[in-house]
Amino acid sequence: MALRVNWDRTPVSVHHTRKDVLEALILFLRNSHGVRRRSIVMEDREEGPGFLFFLYQPCDPRWIASFDVAKFPEEE
């Protein structure tokens, strides 16, 4: 599954079916772009199954698009 970002809500939410992918994205955004204001990764109880976190500071959509989700093979 690809990352899904809800840019229409405040704060912006980032969704994926796997928690480890979102945790890796958080590290990528922090290390590559200095994004630090975000929530922890939590279960997506509204739109699940899956996980989400919230971004509490501006984030360029290209930064998330440049994250390589393909490094995480699908679980069986």
Image (cartoon, rainbow, N blue to C red):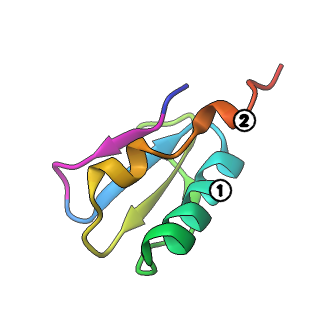
Picture mark count:
2
Image position, residue 35 (x, y; %)? 42, 75
The quarter of the rendered structure image containing the C terminus is top right
Q: Is residue 30 positioned above or below 64 on the image?
A: below
15 part of magenta stretch: no
Residue 15 has which mark?
A: none
7 part of magenta stretch: yes
Q: Amino acid at mark 1?
A: Ala
Do the residues under discs 1 and 2 have CB atoms within 8 angstroms?
Answer: yes
Q: Residue at horizontal 46%, vertical 80%? A: 36
Q: Residue at horizontal 27%, vertical 58%? A: 60
Q: Secondary structure at mark 1?
A: helix
> Which residue extends farthest right?
76
Question: Taking 23 as reference, is 15 left or right?
Answer: left
Task: State the extent of the magenta-drawn residues as a range.
Answer: 3-9
Query: Disc 1 versus disc 2: distance between alpha carbons?
Result: 10 Å
Is 37 or 31 nearer to us in this picture? 31
Image position, residue 57 (x, y; %)? 29, 75
The image quarter containing residue 72 is: top right
Q: Residue at horizontal 75%, vertical 27%? A: 73
Q: Is residue 62 positioned above or below 4 on the image?
A: below
Which residue in the structure is indicated by mark 2?
72
Which residue in the structure is indicated by mark 1?
24
Q: Secondary structure at mark 2?
A: loop
Image position, residue 21 (x, y; %)? 64, 46
Image position, residue 41 (x, y; %)? 58, 61
Q: Is residue 46 something one can see in this rendering?
A: no
Q: Is residue 4 positioned above or below 44 on the image?
A: above
